[in-house]
Image (cartoon, rainbow, N blue to C red):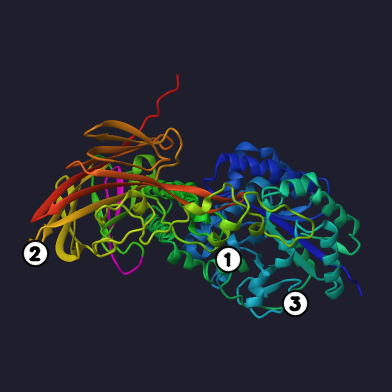
């Protein structure tokens, strides 16, 4: 009996839309280029490649020679290229029209640039639903790579996973190949000899079969410690050499080659699933991330909203579609261990692209204008209000304290309220015991990226503070008298009112040049052991031209017995970073002062405060009546990157605080304004 085996080996190379240029450079220099250069020296070794569109775009501008080498390898039959969603969306969360458009965009590029017809497809994060079978088959996809976990869920025994299956219910057969989890964990962490020995064992038990391993290319140089292992210690070269030396029983093949010469193992209907780790993080379904992270749900709802508006108003707009597709890159929509939604730059970039896509709809608008739309934006059963003018998109949720959950400064394509809430993550429990340096790689350790992480700095456990409410803006706190800033920052206090998370009534009034939005609630505050019913009204006034609005607060004591109150109105503003060019500037009764975004501060008698963001060129101002105190602090979260656990700046919290006795009525005004900020030129 022929005790040989086919190895279907490949890599998926991806960098998120909006990732730092330095990361693209490092990944290319320490991972993508040395991998391709090493493989190039072994023309007899076959390999499968997938490159995401965001990486392709960067390589076209910065390292086109690498793509030319890959093209040469294609032409000599050494490798094949996979299609997929161009900007790496999760297909199960985007409309079918966008699935088709993203696949067509990638396939058209491969045909045009590489002069190659793709047969198979890389499925982002391997998130699968049965409805995709017909969609992908109709798009001309011949096969899809999934994980062995998908097949096990479909009741296929592990010993029957060395080959491929087909979905016989599609008009054109669609094949599924199972990626081996064991090989994912072995390569490149076990010695090449032991990987070959493992494959030898498979060949003995399943002669003539195929073992499939297509995994993240970043494990070959970008993951902690792997550049030294894979290239300096020549793991990859040794592995490829052993494949060559054992070619009499260990054949490498492209997946298309294998399909052309081998029949499927049978038919299959694969249930909704992803790889095993993703199933754990998402609690079985990718959409559960939108329940756990309202911020992800907001981005998801915004993406669907823009897609629908484009389809209705301007479906032929290539510019609009491209930016929509850019905004569908999966990375900021979820979180496992790595940054994902916690990486503010990825969220900001997604929002920016969606705002640009939506601006296509306004190309014919001229002069001052204003419009409003009452819609269940996030499909939660409660309506949200959207107010737009030439410079602002303001999203208001009456159901959550009458807060603002998105505010787009349109001239800069920036959602300045793209912020995060601090919440516990399972891996936080490990942080106090982790070493500062990552685990060193030793031969034959069955490791994954999750095993390699250390802490990038000491004392991260001090930042494991969590919020009991969603961080929005224009939130109304009634705070305990004497509460210090530190306790507010660390969420160590009890609300003295029932306004923060409660539903406000909504009324709208239109004027020739503007709109007023009236949010009101009757509730209770509790001070000095006594409950007092009060009415709180906030009136937001927008005009038809400017990037500013006024908020008038009106409080009424409904039982007329005087009560001492501490009213704090919370704003969460997302600066690009805490860099030196970004700071707060306060004007008070006592003078003027600048504060870096790295510091907590409090000040009395505030007239106005400005946040200067040199990175985005935006200045955000809040003008206050009645000289409140002002609290401000940076809000940071703790998550992991590929280099270890780290702090991530998310936003700057700005809180005007008024302390007064409410006898009958009380009122004040806030002006909120956004304008361009020019960075001073260096002399």
Give the label, 1 or 3, closer to the camera.
1
The residue tagged 3 is: 160
Q: CA–CA distance between discs 2 and 1? A: 54 Å
In the rendered image, the vertical position of residue 669 relative to residue 244, given as above or below: above
Which segment is the magenta one? 379-396
Q: Which mark is residue 185?
A: none
Q: Residue at x 19, y 55 (%)?
A: 565
The residue tagged 1 is: 278
The residue tagged 2 is: 559
First-in-chain label (2 vs 1): 1
Label 3 close to label 2 by CB (< 8 Å) = no
Judge by depth and name the residue closer to the eye, 347 or 625. 625
In the rendered image, the vertical position of residue 224 relative to residue 618, given as above or below: below
Q: Is residue 318 visible?
A: no
Q: Quadrant of residue 381?
A: bottom left
Quarter of the image with the C terminus is: top left
């Amino acid at each position: 009996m022929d005790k040989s085996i086919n190895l279907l080996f490949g890599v998926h190379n991806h960098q998120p839309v909006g990732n730092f240029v330095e990361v693209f450079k490092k990944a290319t220099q320490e991972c993508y280029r040395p991998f391709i250069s090493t493989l190039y020296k072994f023309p007899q070794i076959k390999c499968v490649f997938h490159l995401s569109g965001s990486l392709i775009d960067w390589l076209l501008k910065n390292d086109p020679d690498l793509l030319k080498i890959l093209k040469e390898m294609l032409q000599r039959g050494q490798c094949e290229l996979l299609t997929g969603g161009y900007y790496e969306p999760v297909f199960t969360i985007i409309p079918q029209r966008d699935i088709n458009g993203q696949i067509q965009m990638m396939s058209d590029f491969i045909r045009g640039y590489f002069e190659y017809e793709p047969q198979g497809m890389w499925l982002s994060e391997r998130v699968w639903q049965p409805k995709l079978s017909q969609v992908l088959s109709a798009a001309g996809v011949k096969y899809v790579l999934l994980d062995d976990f998908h097949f096990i869920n479909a009741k296929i025994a592990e010993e029957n996973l060395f080959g491929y299956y087909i979905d016989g219910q599609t008009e054109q057969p669609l094949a599924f190949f199972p990626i081996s989890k064991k090989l994912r964990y072995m390569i490149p962490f076990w010695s090449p000899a032991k990987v070959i020995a493992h494959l030898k064992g498979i060949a003995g038990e399943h002669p003539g079969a195929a073992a499939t391993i297509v995994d993240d290319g970043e494990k070959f140089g970008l993951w902690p410690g792997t550049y030294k292992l894979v290239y300096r210690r020549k793991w990859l070269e040794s592995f490829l050499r052993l494949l060559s030396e054992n070619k009499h029983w260990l054949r490498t093949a492209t997946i298309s080659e294998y399909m052309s010469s081998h029949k499927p193992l049978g038919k299959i209907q694969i249930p909704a699933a992803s790889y095993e780790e993703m199933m754990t993080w998402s609690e079985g379904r990718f959409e559960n991330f939108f329940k756990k992270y309202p911020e992800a749900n907001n981005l998801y709802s915004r993406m669907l909203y823009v897609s629908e508006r484009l389809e209705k108003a301007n479906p032929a707009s290539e510019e609009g579609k491209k930016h929509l597709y850019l905004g569908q890159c999966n990375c900021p929509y979820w979180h496992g261990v790595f940054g994902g939604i916690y990486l503010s730059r990825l969220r900001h970039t997604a929002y920016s692209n969606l705002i640009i896509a939506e601006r296509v709809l306004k190309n014919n608008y001229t002069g001052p204008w204003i419009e409003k739309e009452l819609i269940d934006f996030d499909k939660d059963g409660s309506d949200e209000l959207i107010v737009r003018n030439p410079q602002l998109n303001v999203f208001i949720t009456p159901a959550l304290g009458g807060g603002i959950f998105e505010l787009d400064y349109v001239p800069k394509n920036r959602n300045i309220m793209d912020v995060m809430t601090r919440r516990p993550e399972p891996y936080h429990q490990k942080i106090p015991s982790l070493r500062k340096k990552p685990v060193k790689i030793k031969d034959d350790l069955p490791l994954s990226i999750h095993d390699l992480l250390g802490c990038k700095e000491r004392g991260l456990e001090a930042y494991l503070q969590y919020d009991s409410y969603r961080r929005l803006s224009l939130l109304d706190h009634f705070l305990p008298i004497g509460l210090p800033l530190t306790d507010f920052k660390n969420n160590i206090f009890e609300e003295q009112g029932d306004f923060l998370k409660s539903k406000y009534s909504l009324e709208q009034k239109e004027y020739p040049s503007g709109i007023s939005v009236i949010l009101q609630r009757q509730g209770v505050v509790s001070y000095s052991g006594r409950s007092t019913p009060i009415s709180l009204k906030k009136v937001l006034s927008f005009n038809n031209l400017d990037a500013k609005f006024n908020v008038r607060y009106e409080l009424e004591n409904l039982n007329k017995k005087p009560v001492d109150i501490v009213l704090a109105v919370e704003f969460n503003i997302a600066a690009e970073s805490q860099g030196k060019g970004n700071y707060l500037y306060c004007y008070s009764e006592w003078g003027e002062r600048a504060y870096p975004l790295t510091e907590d501060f409090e000040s009395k008698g505030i007239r106005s405060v400005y946040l200067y963001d040199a990175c985005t060129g935006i200045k955000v101002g809040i003008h206050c009546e009645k000289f409140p105190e002002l609290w401000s602090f940076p809000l940071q979260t703790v998550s992991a990157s590929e280099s270890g656990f780290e702090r991530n700046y998310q936003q700057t919290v700005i809180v005007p605080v008024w302390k007064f006795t409410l006898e009958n009525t009380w009122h004040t005004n806030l002006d909120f304004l956004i304008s361009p900020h020019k960075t001073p030129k260096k002399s």
